[in-house]
């Protein structure tokens, strides 16, 4: 609970700063478009956070997002696969990546950090190999018949009409929906209990009859599938993508979002609400920097510093509350 | 009552300590003379460990004072306490598992050269380490082993050796023997006798009252965070201690009311079982319905490993398990549990409990399949389960939401029982079933096990506690170096017969 208070406080401060820097930044339109971006980050954060709860880590998220974006474009442009089946294939790709990660971590007992670090290189490289630049426009140029379903997909998933104007923050809605599902599993079902138990003490979970390997692997599958979904969203949201940069660094954003939202890197801790709140922080910081007219090169420094302060404040709050408990 | 000497080595006066929701200590006092061995006994949660931690600077008291040689002291941490000669060996072991035994013996006070560079003086370490291990009776080949590879009993001895390596004047041992076998315990008595002769004062906590009778000069009893009384050397008897601890007399310590003592049909059969990492000789035995099969052996005899193989933790490489005469396939603990084969593991903090999580969480964990479907846990049924087992086992906890790791050792053990009893076992494997459990709770657990056996549950009880083995077993299997060395029916069950087989003697 107190962990959530910390991130809520941080968000309040950030939104206030946003308003203070330029009231236009807090117009309804501006905030909705911000929420939409938060949604996109959040979808990816949910998966990374689940892995963290079971005591693992997934560094391949950003590359899987990028690879999925490129794959989605290439499947449609070069292979002429219609958008809906193409999306299905991309999700399947994500699930497969997760399964491989999961099996390597559980069956071969490799360290998650190492396995997913390798994945980070492999899928970034793969993205470059299968295509360099992708975008909705090249799809419709090659296959004009895909335009209607691509537009519909963009409207329902990303909330933008065919001219690229935001109609409603669909990605934020998607995030809330997914978070509700994740929250249900985490807090209401046996699965969630097993994930927490594995994160706290894998041995004890095993001795209690929990099929540790299966649950661990499942969480990696969920994580990479959500990353693939994130890749599809990214494709639909923005006009063109470079294989080099699409989704780059997102794994760190996702991990930081999860940690800010109360997940402990030691495993065993975290809530669905926290994950959503944690994922909301970084986009606000980016927007704040942009609106202050700062060069975008300062973004990493600002993000790093804010997060550090956030973490310190959070820790201080927790210490106090522990004393007063 | 003996009059305490003029300036005791250690004096604690009216010490108080509260934790959220719990008053752990409420004005407890004790004195300790130089070269005296004072045993501190009391039920689980009586506050013994808390008092020791305050004396050794782990906790700060809320009230009261501690004096060392007449000087008031309040150690800010264990480091300062150790420097002053007050060393605590924790109930739950505190070794750096990934380092070698030698490294652990000197952790934090390594002999170094090279000034600020603190280059390790390996030779001095090795020499002194060998001497320390010899004092606790561990073979020198352990020096270079990583601690995680040692069985629990040896880890405990390493902890004691580490304490001996400091200029110790007050040595506090919190349940040092709970994971030691008879032989190792004897070894510890010699160490204690040597310390006493050197004028070192010893505070000794144990739930094994026979031990207390054997080695204590005086006994002080705690109950519910208060002093319940003191016994001088001549008055130390099992009954006197129990009376002070639980506030009443206790009869029938090892009950045999509900079970007949003669096993029925074999429930669990091990036929020529071998497992990965185990000995070359296959093991065969059977556990029968309604009987308590005791299993004895020295530490390292492979008892825990065998039970873990049966429970699915270690993969079988040969042989067969049979349940009610039918082949049973166990690929992992989940299979064993589904078949009603339940294990109360030896190391509860590592295997038995998720210590960071709540008591209720732990009680529910293996029973979630029964608390509604996998989709959605029924909250009410769950709360009911928590209430039932916390009450029935009289777990001392402020609520089901308390993290299990904050309970006293014995109460943690009860939670482990609770999670299995809530399931209802067919075969119950108990590995050191009353480790760290107080007399009252022990009697309750024995009664419970007796009742389960009476209902036809097959109980396989691995124990290093000779009294318990002799008191509870209907039949005993003795292990030696990984193989079944022999079997003793109730009629031929004596301590000598058990030790004979356990030390490699041939069956007669
Ligand atoms: N860090 C802590 N936080 C909260 N409660 C605690 C903490 N440490 C101990 N307690 C509580 O204080 C009481 C006394 O505990 P303590 O460990 O001293 O008992 P004990 O006499 O050593 O019992 P045992 O024989 O089971 O080891 C218990 O009710 C326990 O739950
Ligand atoms: Mg204790």
Image (spheres, coloured by chain):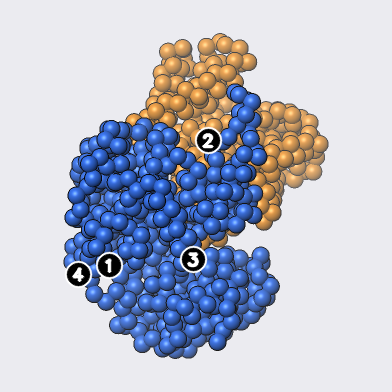
Chain colours: A orange, B blue
Question: Seen in the image, is B22 located left or right of residue B154?
Answer: left
Q: Nearer the viewer, mark 4 or mark 2?
A: 2
Residue nearest the observer in this picture, B408 or B422: B408
Q: Which residue sits at x=24%, y=75%? A: B251
Tell which subunit mark 3 falls on: B
Residue nearest the observer in this picture, B104 or A230: B104
Examine the rendered structure and indicate whether residue B66 appears above or below residue B336.
above
Examine the rendered structure and indicate whether residue A234 appears above or below residue B459.
above
Q: Nearer the viewer, mark 4 or mark 3?
A: 3
Q: Position of residue B370 (x, y in %)?
A: 41, 67
Q: Position of residue B442 (x, y in %)?
A: 33, 67
Q: CA distance from mark 1 to mark 4?
A: 11 Å
**Discs 1, 3: same chain:** yes
Q: Which residue sits at x=29%, y=46%? A: B33
Q: Nearer the viewer, mark 1 or mark 4?
A: 1
Find numbered disc 2 in the image and state the secondary structure of the residue it sits on.
loop
- Residue B226 visible in the picture: yes
Marks 1 and 2, the one that precedes in the sequence: 2
Q: CA distance from mark 4 to mark 2?
A: 48 Å
Q: Which residue sits at x=58%, y=52%? A: B148
- Residue A159 visible in the picture: no
Q: Position of residue A222 (x, y in %)?
A: 59, 48
Q: Which mark is residue B249?
A: 4
Residue underneath mark 2: B109
Name the quadrant containing residue B379: bottom left
Q: Could you tell me which quadrant the N terminus of chain A lies in?
A: top left
Residue underneath mark 1: B238
Find numbered disc 1 in the image and state the secondary structure of the residue it sits on.
helix
């Amino acid at each position: 609970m107190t962990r959530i208070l910390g991130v809520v406080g941080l968000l309040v401060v950030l939104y206030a700063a946003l308003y203070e820097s330029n009231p236009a930044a807090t117009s309804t339109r501006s905030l909705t478009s911000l929420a939409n971006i938060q949604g996109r980050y959040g979808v990816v954060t949910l998966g990374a956070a689940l892995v963290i709860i079971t005591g693992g880590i997934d560094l391949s998220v950003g590359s899987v997002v990028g690879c999925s974006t490129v794959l989605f474009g290439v499947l449609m442009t070069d292979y002429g696969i219609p958008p809906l089946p193409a999306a299905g294939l991309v999700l399947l790709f994500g699930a497969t990546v997760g399964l491989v990660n999961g099996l390597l971590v559980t069956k071969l007992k490799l360290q998650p950090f190492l396995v997913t670090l390798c994945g980070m290189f492999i899928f970034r490289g793969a993205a470059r190999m299968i295509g360099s630049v992708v975008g909705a426009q090249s799809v419709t140029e090659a296959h004009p018949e895909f335009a209607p379903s691509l537009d519909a997909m963009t409207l329902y998933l990303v909330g933008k009409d065919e001219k690229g104007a935001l109609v409603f923050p669909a990605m934020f809605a998607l995030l809330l929906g997914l978070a509700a599902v994740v929250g249900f599993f985490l807090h209401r079902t046996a699965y969630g209990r097993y994930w927490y138990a594995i994160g706290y003490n894998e041995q004890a979970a095993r001795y209690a009859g929990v099929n540790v390997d299966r649950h661990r692997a499942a969480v990696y599958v969920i994580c990479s599938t959500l990353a693939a979904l994130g890749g599809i969203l990214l494709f639909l949201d923005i006009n063109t993508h470079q294989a080099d940069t699409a989704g780059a660094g997102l794994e760190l954003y996702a991990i930081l979002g999860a940690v800010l939202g109360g997940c402990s890197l030691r495993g065993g801790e975290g809530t669905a609400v926290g994950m959503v709140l944690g994922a909301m922080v970084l986009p606000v910081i980016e927007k704040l920097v942009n609106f202050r007219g700062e060069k975008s090169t300062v973004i990493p420094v600002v993000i790093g510093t804010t997060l550090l302060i956030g973490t310190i404040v959070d820790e201080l709050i927790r210490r106090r509350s522990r004393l007063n408990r | 009552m003996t009059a305490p000497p003029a300036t005791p080595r250690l004096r604690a006066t009216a010490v108080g300590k509260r934790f959220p929701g719990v008053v752990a200590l409420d004005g407890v006092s004790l004195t300790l003379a130089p070269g005296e061995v004072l045993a501190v006994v009391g039920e689980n949660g009586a506050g013994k460990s808390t008092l020791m931690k305050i004396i050794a600077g782990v906790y700060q008291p809320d009230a009261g004072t501690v004096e060392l040689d007449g000087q008031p002291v309040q150690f800010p941490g264990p480091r300062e306490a150790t420097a002053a000669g007050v060393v605590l060996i924790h109930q739950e072991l505190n070794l750096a598992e990934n380092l070698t035994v030698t490294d652990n013996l000197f952790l934090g006070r390594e002999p170094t050269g090279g000034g600020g560079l603190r280059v390790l003086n390996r030779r001095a370490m090795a020499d002194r380490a060998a001497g320390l291990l010899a004092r606790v009776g561990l073979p020198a080949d352990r020096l270079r082993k990583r601690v995680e590879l040692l069985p629990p009993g040896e880890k405990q001895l390493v902890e004691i050796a580490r304490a001996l390596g400091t200029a110790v004047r007050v040595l506090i041992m919190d349940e040092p023997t709970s994971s030691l076998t008879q032989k190792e315990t004897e070894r510890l008595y010699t160490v204690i006798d040597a310390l006493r002769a050197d004028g070192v004062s010893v505070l000794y906590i144990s739930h094994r009252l026979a031990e207390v009778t054997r080695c204590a000069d005086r006994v002080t009893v705690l109950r519910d965070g208060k002093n319940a009384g003191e016994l001088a050397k001549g008055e130390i008897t099992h009954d006197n201690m129990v009376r002070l601890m639980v506030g009443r007399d206790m009869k029938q310590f090892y009950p045999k009311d509900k079970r007949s003592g003669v096993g029925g049909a074999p429930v669990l059969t091990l036929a020529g079982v071998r497992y990965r990492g185990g000995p070359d000789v296959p093991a065969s035995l059977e556990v029968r319905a309604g009987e308590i099969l005791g299993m004895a052996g020295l530490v390292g005899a492979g008892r825990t490993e065998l039970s873990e193989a049966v429970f699915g933790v270690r993969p079988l490489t040969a042989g067969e398990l049979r349940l009610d005469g039918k082949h049973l396939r166990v690929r992992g603990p989940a299979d064993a549990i589904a078949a009603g084969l339940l294990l109360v593991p030896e190391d509860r903090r590592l295997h038995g409990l998720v210590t960071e999580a709540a008591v209720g969480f732990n009680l529910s964990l293996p029973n979630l399949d029964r608390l509604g479907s996998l989709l959605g846990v029924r909250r009410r049924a769950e709360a009911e389960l928590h209430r039932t087992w916390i009450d029935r086992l009289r777990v001392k906890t402020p609520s089901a939401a308390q993290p299990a790791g904050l309970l006293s050792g014995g109460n943690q053990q009860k939670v482990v029982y609770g999670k299995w009893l809530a399931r209802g076992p067919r075969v119950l494997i108990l590995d050191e079933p009353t480790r760290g459990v107080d007399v009252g709770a022990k009697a309750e657990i024995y009664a419970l096990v007796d009742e389960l056996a009476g209902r036809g549950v097959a109980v396989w009880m691995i124990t290093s506690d000779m009294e318990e083995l002799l008191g509870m077993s209907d039949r005993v299997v003795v292990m030696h170096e990984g193989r079944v060395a022999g079997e003793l029916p109730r009629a031929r069950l004596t301590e000598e017969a058990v030790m004979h087989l356990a030390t490699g003697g041939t069956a007669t």
